[in-house]
Image (cartoon, rainbow, N blue to C red):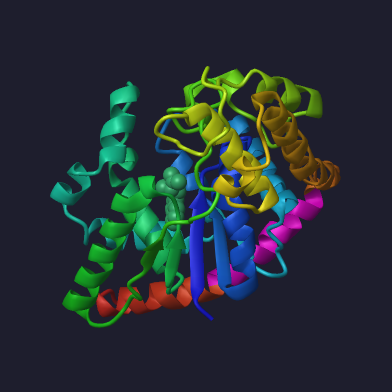
Amino acid sequence: MARVFSGIQPSGDLHLGNLLGALMNWVNHQEEHDAVYCIVDLHALTLPKDPEELRSNTLQLAQLLMAVGLDPNKSTLFVQSHVQEHSQLAWLMECTVSFGELSRMTAFKDKSDRSEFISAGLFTYPALQAADILLYDTDLVPVGDDQRQHIEITRDVAERFNHRFGETFVVPQHVIPKAGARVMDLQHPERKMSKSEHSVNGTINVLENPDSVRKKIKRAVTDSDGEVRFDFEEKAGVSNLLSILGAAKGIPPSEVATSFERYGDLKAATADAVIELLSPIQERFADLQSDPAETRRLLQVGADKAREVASATLTRAQHNCGLLES
Ligand code: TRP
């Protein structure tokens, strides 16, 4: 079975874009793959974070992921800092990646432009990400196109290490999730739905209540030509609604378009579909939230499972690059 690895930063909530773009795929991958999912709290530290917020966001994200359908019995779900091999391999990766390669990362440029304190960790972020992926002999990394450079650098670093020190790492492949990947801001349909934009009316949270979901979808920006047609270039707002409705129902958006003549009807159906999708998730979340000790126990089980693979890979890497066994 091919191994899939993906990571997600612990921000306290998830929005519809995360859910329909990435997480539904993560849930599906559990069935046909050996899936490993990591809440990357160490990566979160690359930008200033409030300690209590980080801790509670990490726990809450674990509960959200489980509520969405990541099943600790089917896949491995764990917190990055619980498996120390990540930090340990990250150092070896830092010594394998070059300053020039790190300097070319657009994610670093974007984030450092927006931050007044630029940590060294923000710069070496891709080395830690490479360690995450390579520790698990990962075959496939299902992440969005925005992660392309990070996956490429991981492949380059793996190949370089193997070339210098002999076969050590599996060289992973990037898979860009296909269907439903495109969820845009409801108020600014030309840009992706994103937490960092602080567009309250353009973003639907996974934990949002039905009334608020309906209101936001009702107010979503469309256009004035009145035709329901899937065409992101010309009709971004309408296409976004079709894309959300299609992804929630598992139907291609262009097919969804043929069922509607009026924007009002499309909006009502989209709101219904989103509410129907979210309500069981919200119920499961409430259950999980009522028993944090159980979530912690499940994360512990996940970390133990992860560590088994990670420690073998780390030992191999340490040996191959010449560190003396302790
Ligand atoms: N950089 C990823 C993001 O911002 C998160 C991440 C960290 C990740 N380590 C990973 C993704 C390993 C995939 C594999 O979304």
User: In the picture, which quadrant includes the N terminus?
Assistant: bottom right
Above or below, comparing residue 200 to residue 91 in the picture: above
Main secondary structure type of the part rendered in magenta: helix
Residue 73 appears left or right of 146: right
Percent from the top left, x then y, of residue 171? 32, 72
Viewer-side residue, 277 vs 250: 250
The correct choice, above or below, for 166 with respect to 109 in the image is below
Is 295 magenta? The answer is: yes
Residue bounds of the magenta highlight: 293-307
Residue 58 visible in this rendered orientation of the protein: no
Q: Is residue 289 visible?
A: yes
Instruction: State the image coordinates of residue 181 (x, y, percent, origin top left).
Output: 51, 47
> In the image, is 12 to the left or to the right of 131?
right
Q: Nearer the viewer, residue 269 or 19?
A: 269
Location of residue 275 by image quarter: top right
The quarter of the rendered structure image containing the C terminus is: bottom left
- Give how far across and how far down residue 319 sits, in percent: 31, 79
Q: How far from the left and from the top, in percent, is residue 220?
A: 60, 22
Q: Is residue 300 magenta?
A: yes
Left or right, 163 with respect to 86, comes to left
